[in-house]
Image (cartoon, rainbow, N blue to C red):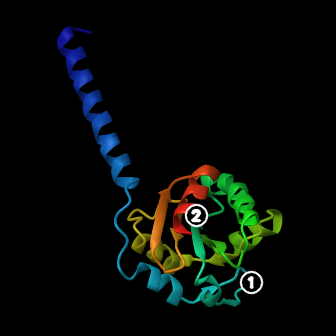
Amino acid sequence: MNRRQFLFGGSIAIIAAAAGALIANWQTRINPASAEAVKALFEREWLSPDQKPISTADWKNKVLVVNFWASWCPPCVEEMPALDKIQGEYDPKNMLIVGIGIDSPSNIRQFIETTIISYPIVLGGLGGNEINKMLGNPSGALPFTVVINPKGQIKGRKLGKISKDELRKMIKDAI
């Protein structure tokens, strides 16, 4: 290999790396939430995994942690024990975690039959993914966690697997 071929190959590698970094940055960015996002979250008709309507009235006037997830998403499944533990640390009258499954109803039902989760899970479907995007996640990537204070204001968001410490801080900031 001569020097010219080496430099050309190196240039191509640098361009490819830069393009990859730009694409990764675009996919993992969080945009400002739309003004209607929280309102849409509360107004949407959500269903339980067994297709029964869920009242969002129980979600209001408390710190609400909304976690968008899917059963096929490894980081989503990995963070669920942390979410479950944190739900147990708070009185559900003051703080509630809600998992919105962006997955098929049958996959969600099958998943929760084998996984112990103490917080409510609702079916998201395509409408749930639209709200995910309205809350500032333009790519719809998972997991995505949003913390809303009792006044309905977004106080924290995290795209990707959230740690217990990150979530506790967001909840504390929202109280």
Give the x, y percent position of residue 118: 77, 69
Question: Could you tell me the amino acid type at mark 1?
Answer: Asp
Identify the residue at image location x=69%, y=55%: 82
Q: In this view, does 127 lie to the left or right of 106?
A: left
The CA distance from mark 1 to mark 2 is: 29 Å
Decide: is 165 above or below 131. above
Q: Quadrant of residue 168?
A: bottom right
Give the x, y percent position of residue 122: 65, 78
Question: Could you tell me the amino acid type at mark 2?
Answer: Ile
The label shown at residue 20 is none
Please name the residue that numbered disc 2 is placed on.
171
Please name the residue that numbered disc 1 is placed on.
50
Which part of the image, by quadrant, shows the N terminus? top left
Give the x, y percent position of residue 127: 49, 80
Decide: is 84 above or below 20. below
Outermost top residue: 2
Other residues around mark 1 within 10 Å, as few (<14) / some (14–19) / many (≥20): few
Decide: is 67 above or below 94. above
Identify the residue at image location x=41%, y=53%: 28
